[in-house]
Amino acid sequence: MKSVIVLLGPPGSGKGTQGEMLSEKLGYVRLSTGDMLREAVRNGTELGKKAKTYMDSGALVPNDLIIGLMKEKIAQAEGGVILDGFPRTVEQADALDQQLQVDLALNLDVPDEELINRLTKRRSCPDCNAVYHLIYNPPKTESVCDKCGAKLYQRDDDKEETVANRLKVYRENTMPLIGYYEKKGVLVTIKGVGSIDDIYAQVEKAVQ
Ligand code: AP5
């Protein structure tokens, strides 16, 4: 069983959705840089204050802030880890390489049109970070998280104009990691379109 898993894929490709399912099934720790940064922004920490402007425009938070944060979280994690949203640049991938060996880089491949549709209709839970979609994966009660009962919200960076910039930033900075992990022989690409359960079945197979 692969125990260090990197989830690659553009914004809205389903990294959080699939990563959460995998984490529950395997008991691995899921480390999501996006969730950590949003929590820092909500709590008004130094990191949150520095990260907010970048996140609101759909840009990447500077490498030095992210690498230090993840180094610490990875060192604290016990057992298998799922890295969701990290690394996102070659510099971050090199830093990760110095800390541990990646067993599997799972790349979720989804066309832009579908990504825009998913992100602009996504609703997120501020407390437990669960994600929903108004049409594909709605909560049982409108605007209420099934898991913890908190009121759902729309992320600021899920507005259409910011989504377009996030896709551009992904292509310029993160897409090169597909070749990076392919060269290392650990890349598996999965078509991330179809039902969440069908995609999960392929994810599980790749992890074996
Ligand atoms: P982050 O939170 O990591 O955002 P992201 O990578 O853009 O990914 P998303 O969370 O938007 O999408 P996802 O792939 O997890 O999809 P999800 O499962 O939610 O990062 C946010 C920001 O933080 C960045 O822009 C950057 O500023 C900063 N940041 C984070 N990490 C960084 C790093 N390493 N370096 C620098 N900066 C960093 O699904 C999306 C929607 O689709 C949901 O509504 C879901 O219900 C639905 N859905 C999922 N699967 C399906 C399906 N099969 N069919 C239909 N709908 C589906």
Image: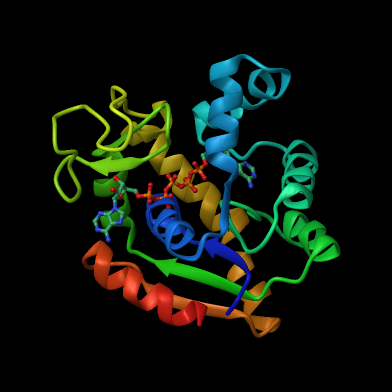
Horizontal relation, residue 207 to residue 78: left or right: left
Identify the residue at image location x=70%, y=24%: 47
Q: Is residue 159 left or right of residue 24?
A: left
Quadrant of residue 143 within the rendered picture: top left
Q: Can you say whether 185 is above or below 192 in the image? A: below
Quadrant the N terminus occupies = bottom right
Note whether 197 is above or below 144 in the view shown.
below
Image-quadrant location for residue 62:
top right
Q: How many marks?
A: 0
Which of the two residues, 111 or 184, is positioned nearer the viewer here? Answer: 184
Q: Is residue 53 visible?
A: no
User: Of 152 and 21, which appears nearest the observer?
Assistant: 21
Q: Where residue 208 appears, x then y in whole percent? A: 50, 83
Is residue 25 depicted above or below 142 in this figure?
below
Residue projecting furthest to the top: 44
Q: Residue at x 52, y 60 (%)?
A: 27
Question: Picture coordinates of residue 119 (x, y %)?
Answer: 32, 43
- Residue for point 62% across, 14% down: 44
Q: Is residue 96 visible?
A: yes
* Color scheme of the displayed model: rainbow
* Residue 6 x, y percent position in the rendering: 59, 64
Q: Nearer the viewer, residue 10 or 185?
A: 185
Location of residue 20 in the rendering, given as x and y in whole percent from the top left corner? 43, 53
What residue is at 31 percent from the left and 24 percent from the top? 150
